[in-house]
Structures are given as C-alpha cells and as structure tokens.
C-alpha cells in the first residue's frame, strides 16, 4: 500500500469539503440547529418528558445522528460522483492506488466532515440545555461505525449512479424518511402496533437509538442490539464497496 | 536490441459483444517515439486505457518493463504516464495544487519546487494560483501534460495531444515530446494528423478496427514505398483493409 498516495487522497478529500465549508459544514449546522430550535426548544417546552428525559434533550442525539448520517453519505457520494463526471477520476485510476487506499481516504474524510458537523450541533444544543454525556464509549462506537457505514454507502451510490438524479434518490427519499421514522423525534414505544414492529426493520432506528443511549442512557433498544445491527451493516457495505472497487465497477471500462 | 519497455501479448478487449481490440500484440522499445495511427474508433484509446489502468483487457497480457499491468499494477503505474484524450480538470484546485496532489497520488512525496519547475516548463507559472476553470483550452492541455510527468514516467502515453490545439501550441508540444525523448522517456502517441507521425515518430503502427495492420520504422516504411508520403501509404492501407472487411 502506498502511504503517500493514501495521505494525499485523504487530504485532498478534506480540502475539497473545507473549501466549500459554507455548503458542507455551515449549511447542515444551520438546518439541524433549526430543527432543534423548533422541535427541541419551542415544542419541547410543552412536551416535557420522553423515556424519562426532558424532550429538549431527547431530540439532541437523534438530530446529531441524522446530520452525521446525511453528511458522511453526501461527502463520499458527491465527491466520487463528481470526479466520475468531470473525468478527474482518471487521476486516481492511473495512479498506484488500490481499493483499500480509496476506501480509507474517502471514508476517513467523510467521517471527519460528519463528526465536525455532529460536534457543532451538539455544542449548539448544549448552549440551550446542558447535560453530560452518559457513556463516551458507546457514543464513540456509534459515531465511528455509523459515519463509516454511510460513507461506504455513499461510495457505492456514486459508483452506481449515472446521473445526478440517481444520486439524489438516497438522501431525500431513503435516508431522510428512514431517519425520521427511526425515532429522531420520538420513541417508538409511543407507536401502536404494527408500526412499532415495522419500525424495528429500519436500520437507522438502531443508529439513532445507539447514539441516544451513549448521550442519555435511554433508548428503545439495548445498545448491544443496536451495536450488532450497526456492525453487521458496516461489514455488509464494506464488503460490497471493496468488491465493487476491486472489480472496477463503472470505473474501469 | 534492448528489451521492450512495453509488451502487449494477444490483447483482446470486448465491450459486450463489440470487439474493440482483436488479439493485438505489440512491443515498444526504450527511448523511441512510437506513433499509433488509425481512424476514429480504431481502438487507439482503448489500447492505451488497457495499459494505463483505465480499462481492463478481456484476454491477453500487458507488461511494462517486465511487470504485469494487472498483477503488478502498483509498479507499472509508477512507470507509466498518461495524457488523456479528454480534458478533465478539478474545479476545486489551482494548477500548482493539482500538480502537488498528482505527485502524491502517484506515490511521490509532493515537492513544491518540482511542481513549480513543471509549471515553468509548460508556461503556466503566472497561472499557478488561478482557478483551473479560468485557464484557456491550450493551458488546460498543457497542465494535463505536466500532470502526466510529475512522477518522471519511463513510458509516456499521449492520446491525441494535439487535437483541437492551435498550430503554435502544437509546435510547442512537439518540441516538448522531442525533449522528453532526449531525456530518455519512451513515448507512445496517438494521432490522426499523419503529418505529426511523419515528423516525430521512430516507428509507426497502424490500427484499424481493433487490428494492427502494420508496425514498421518510419524510415523503412517510407523507403519501401519509394517517395510516397506517409499519408498516401496510410490511406491505401486503410482502404485495402476496408475492402477486405467489406468482402
Ligand atoms: N466504454 C466503452 N463502452 C463501449 N464501447 C466503447 C467504450 N469505449 C470505446 N468503445 C468503442 O470501442 C471502439 C474504439 O474506441 P476508441 O478506443 O476510443 O477509438 P479511437 O481512440 O481509436 O478513436 C469504438 O467503436 C468505441 O465506440
Ligand atoms: Mg481515442
């Protein structure tokens, strides 16, 4: 493996999103903070408690996770897709760079962006409602594996997509609804059957609840179950992304 | 004779049912300028893509200095440079940044003075911090050549480097190609300007519908056809081959 190439590709990806930070960092920060102000601060004062914690705190991990899911996906998918379209992917394809370096560099940079936005959202929330992290270990576990999983999914989507419309399907028609239905704003215990059971088929439920356990110590599912679902998802997309990159799928004709 | 820098053995490339390269074998030797001629769609870019890693041959093997381009891709890609036919550029980076990044991607420690001297060579010094999209077409093409050279390749591919380029820049590129050869780089270029091959090439290959019709040194080719121009020889071969295909 070429460490110089890996470092260069990783830094190139970090610089790419840093150069357009208004769009890649500030915009999701503002959007997510607005959700927090409307649902957490304004409505939350009326809703009082869910699962034994004040509502204004209950929504924080959900919102942090929702933006991290979106931002890590968007970072890899738009970067890889754009270089496919404008032809600069050639620079990487002719270089002594294997699937491993590509995965590490793209996923690493996407995780950095997602974690920066997630941390900023958390800090905004703390300025309204201070609470200590319940468990730093679970918080880190879910942050790392969820952002990595979504970044890998973003790579797969970028490889598969042939036009911008294809790419827009995921964040708008898959990730956003699944995050909302995955309990960002509510506990699925509030749902009647069959919706409670149906909700458990949604992998994003485990991502949201995993981080909620790390932040607050409460969740609809145990952190071990959530961790299992997240790990399996991670391994599945890691295997798929590596296989596609190795085969040159939609990259090397 | 020196061992070949490039050795293609029975290379076949299919896109679905369409065969773009048919059982093609070719050797290119150290220090020469090899011109690959052929009409549009002959398979010139396809062959270059299989060698440089942009495509994968369906059958056959390709070696660069004895290393297999599939199994030893990390080694061969360090040895090979490509100036692609299509101009692609990254809107996020300046020419200087692009060169530094390309060095790193090629596995060479990014080196600012090397990048600056390449910009100098290609008359891009005053554009080094400009947005790449503000460069003229000729400047972008020169940046592509500079990018292909960041890692000092032993074997350089120029895929139609002069298509859509004005006379002045074409002359400059030809001079640059000669200088590179003098410095020891082996060069393979594709073109459909026959004049270009006649002026530059040591050896000439004519590709037509995925098959090499001929590989010969320029001198012996011109001598054999006593006094006729390369263009006449080329057209005759292509027409003959077309007739054969039609029959
Ligand atoms: N990715 C691809 N998929 C399908 N067909 C292709 C692809 N790339 C090239 N071809 C076909 O292969 C043939 C050779 O193309 P190319 O190598 O670009 O020719 P040249 O560079 O000699 O003009 C053409 O008929 C072209 O349409
Ligand atoms: Mg071509």
Image (cartoon, rainbow, N blue to C red):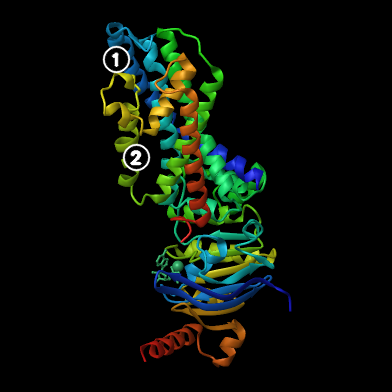
Q: Nearer the viewer, residue B3 or A203?
A: A203
> Does residue A186 appear in this view?
no
Q: How many labels does the image show?
A: 2
Ligand 1 closer than 8 Å to the CB at disc 2?
no
Above or below — where is A154 with respect to A41?
below
Q: Nearer the viewer, residue B184 or A109?
A: A109
Q: Which of A86 and B179 is in front in this view?
A: A86
Q: Mark 2 lies on which chain?
A: A
- Label of residue A72 in the image: none
Q: Residues within 10 Å of mark 1 (few under 14, many from 20)?
A: few
Q: Residues within 10 Å of mark 2 (few under 14, many from 20)?
A: some
Q: Which of marks 2 and 1 is nearer the N terminus?
A: 1
Q: Where is residue B52 in the image (x, y as percent from the top left)?
A: 56, 62
Q: What element carries label 1?
A: helix
- Horizontal side, residue A206 vs residue A194: left or right: right
Q: Position of residue B192 (x, y in %)?
A: 45, 73
Q: Which residue is drawn at 35% across and 22% down?
A: A184
- Horizontal side, residue B125 vs residue A49: left or right: right
Name the quarter showing ligand 2.
Answer: bottom left
Q: Which chain carries label 1?
A: A
Q: What element carries label 2?
A: helix
Above or below — where is A219 with respect to A227?
above
> Does residue B221 appear in this view?
yes
Q: Which of B220 and A33 is in front in this view?
A: A33
Q: Which residue is drawn at 64% across and 68% down?
A: B63
Q: Which residue is drawn at 44% across and 88% down?
A: B236
Disc 1: which residue: A38
- Label of residue A170 in the image: 2
**What is the quadrant of residue A108 in the picture?**
top right
Labels 2 and 1 touching (C-beta < 8 A): no
Q: Where is residue A185 in the image (x, y as percent from the top left)?
A: 32, 20
Q: Residue furthest right?
A: B1
């Amino acid at each position: 493996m070429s460490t110089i190439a890996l470092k260069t590709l990783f830094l190139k990806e970090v610089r790419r999103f840093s150069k357009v930070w208004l769009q890649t960092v500030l915009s999701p920060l503002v959007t997510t903070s607005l959700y927090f102000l409307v649902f957490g601060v304004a409505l939350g004062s009326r809703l009082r408690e869910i699962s034994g914690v004040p509502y204004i705190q209950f929504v924080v991990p959900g919102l942090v996770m929702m933006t991290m899911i979106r931002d890590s996906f968007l970072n890899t998918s738009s970067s890889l897709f754009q270089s496919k379209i404008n032809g600069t992917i050639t620079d990487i394809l002719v270089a002594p760079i294997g699937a491993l370096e590509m995965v590490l560099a793209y996923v690493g940079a996407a995780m950095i962006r997602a974690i920066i936005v997630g941390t900023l959202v958390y800090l905004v929330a703390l300025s309204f409602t201070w609470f200590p992290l319940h468990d730093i270990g679970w918080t880190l576990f879910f942050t790392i594996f969820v952002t990595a999983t979504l970044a890998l999914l973003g790579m797969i989507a970028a490889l598969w997509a042939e036009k911008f419309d294809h790419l827009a399907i995921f964040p708008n028609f898959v990730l956003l609804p699944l995050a909302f239905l995955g309990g960002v704003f509510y506990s699925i215990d509030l749902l009647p059957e069959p919706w409670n059971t149906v909700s458990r088929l949604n992998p994003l439920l485990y991502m949201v609840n995993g981080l909620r356990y790390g932040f607050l110590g409460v969740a609809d599912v145990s952190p071990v179950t959530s961790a299992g679902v997240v790990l399996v998802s991670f391994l599945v997309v890691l295997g798929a992304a590596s296989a596609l990159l190795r085969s040159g799928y939609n990259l090397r004709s | 004779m020196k061992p070949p820098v490039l050795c293609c053995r029975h290379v076949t490339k299919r896109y679905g049912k369409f065969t773009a390269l048919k059982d093609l074998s070719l050797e290119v030797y150290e220090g020469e300028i090899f011109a690959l001629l052929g009409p549009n769609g002959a398979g010139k870019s396809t062959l270059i893509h299989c060698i440089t890693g942009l495509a994968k041959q369906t059958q056959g093997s390709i070696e660069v200095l004895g290393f297999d381009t599939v199994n030893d891709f990390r080694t061969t890609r360090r040895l090979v440079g490509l100036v692609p036919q299509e101009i692609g550029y990254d809107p996020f980076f300046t020419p200087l940044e692009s060169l530094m990044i390309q060095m790193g991607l090629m596995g060479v420690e990014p080196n600012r003075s090397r990048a600056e001297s390449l910009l100098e060579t290609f008359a891009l010094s005053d554009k080094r911090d400009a947005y790449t999209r503000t460069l003229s077409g000729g400047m972008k093409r020169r940046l592509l050549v500079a990018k292909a050279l960041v890692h000092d390749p032993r074997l350089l591919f120029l895929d139609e480097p002069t298509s859509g380029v004005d006379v002045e820049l074409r002359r400059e590129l030809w001079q640059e190609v000669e200088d590179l050869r003098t410095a020891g780089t082996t060069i393979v270029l594709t073109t459909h300007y026959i004049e270009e091959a006649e002026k530059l090439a040591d050896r000439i290959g004519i590709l037509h519908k995925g098959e090499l019709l001929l590989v010969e040194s320029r001198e012996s080719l011109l001598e054999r056809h006593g006094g006729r121009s390369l263009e006449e020889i080329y057209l005759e071969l292509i027409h003959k081959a077309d007739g054969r295909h039609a029959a």
